[in-house]
Amino acid sequence: MAEKGPIGVFDSGYGGLTVLKSLVEKLPNHEFLYLGDNARTPYGTRSFETIYRYTLQSVKYLFSQGCPLIIVACNTASAKALRNIQQKDLPTIAPDRRVLGVLRPTTETIGNQTSTGHIGILGTRGTIQSESYLIEIKKFFPHLKVSQEICPMWVPLVENGEQDGPGADYFVQKNLNHILKADDKIDTLLLACTHYPLLIPKIKQFLPPNIKIIDQGKIVADSLFDYLNRHPEIEEKLRKSGSVKFLTTDDENAFNEKATLFYGKKTITEKTDLNIR
Ligand code: DGL
């Protein structure tokens, strides 16, 4: 049998660490390899072509590191690049391996969270303009009323450590007011960006208490757990060392400094240039 390998977890930077945290909690014996493309973050403002190219390069790199399965823990990359990679690239570059995203697990369960049938999606420009959430939710919950809101300043606020500061008040309030004005029956708000969980205390400060905030970590972890039960042929290729390794495309010390905020624990990170040797 071929050598076993870790589950690769990819994000444009730090955001995917909020998902990794839930994955490790759910699958503590599995081995994980996290890759943050911090040198090229943010992805949310970039073109389809660029996000696709960056994501594909990172996926190929994680394959070269022996990952039989990769979770793209970035909404922007999942919305803009994943389908192409799964349908166009995977059959030729790695037909026996799998790449999964965060969109599908979220869209197939989100309708169960709402009582009014009205939900709001908050995300980056890339995610929202792709309309991937609207398209996917319609497949599972055709009667749901879905409003979307681009929150362009939320990732920079988090990236710059301003999520608890007074500067965040203005932008968080502005986007929440805007989406709730568009539909005052919204009772469920999806944080469709892996950076946004860090803003939850601030969001709660300005959101009516009857509105539920959904973050994706647990949803993605539960979905992966089910997936591995249904796909023993993938599960048996995964190494169970219980270790978590971290890679970044930018400065490893800067990554370690910020990562704790997202991951909740200290990280030891190596730098990679994504060249496959
Ligand atoms: N974490 C990414 C997401 O979930 C957004 C960050 C970025 O723009 O690169 O969409």
Image (tube, helix red, strand yellow):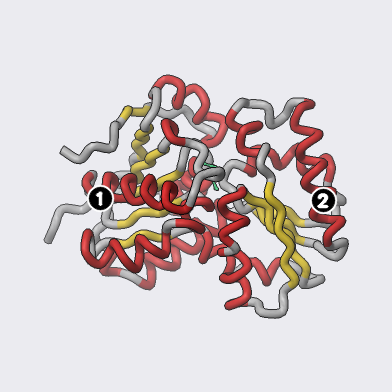
Say whether residue 45 is left or right of residue 67. Answer: right
Which picture quadrant has residue 96?
Answer: bottom left
Q: Amino acid at mark 2?
A: His
In this orientation, which residue lies closer to the viewer: 73 or 52? 52
**Secondary structure beneath disc 1?**
helix
Q: Is residue 21 visible?
A: no
Residue at 38%, 27% in the rendered image:
268
Give the quadrant of ligand 1: top right
Residue furthest out toward the top: 253
Disc ID at residue 207: none
Question: In the figure, 249 relative to 195: above or below?
Answer: above
Disc nearest the viewer among 1 and 2: 2
**Secondary structure beneath disc 2?**
helix
Q: CA distance from mark 1 to mark 2?
A: 42 Å
Q: Amino acid at mark 1?
A: Phe
The spot of residue 274 in percent (x, y) is 28, 37
Asked if the residue at label 1 sits under 8 Å from ligand 1, the reply is no
In the picture of the structure, the residue carrying the numbered disc 2 is 178
In this orientation, which residue lies closer to the viewer: 86 or 235? 86
For mark 1, does the 10 Å Cα neighbourhood hold few (<14), some (14 to 19), or many (20 or more) residues? many
Sequence order check: which comes first, mark 1 or mark 2?
1
Residue at 26%, 68% in the rendered image:
233
Residue furthest out toward the left: 1
The spot of residue 5 in percent (x, y) is 24, 50
Question: In the figure, 186 relative to 77: above or below?
Answer: below
The spot of residue 277 in percent (x, y) is 15, 38
For mark 2, does the 10 Å Cα neighbourhood hold few (<14), some (14 to 19), or many (20 or more) residues? few
Residue at 56%, 59% in the rendered image:
130
Where's the N terminus, which quadrant? bottom left
In the picture of the structure, the residue carrying the numbered disc 1 is 63
Say whether residue 66 is left or right of residue 108. Answer: left
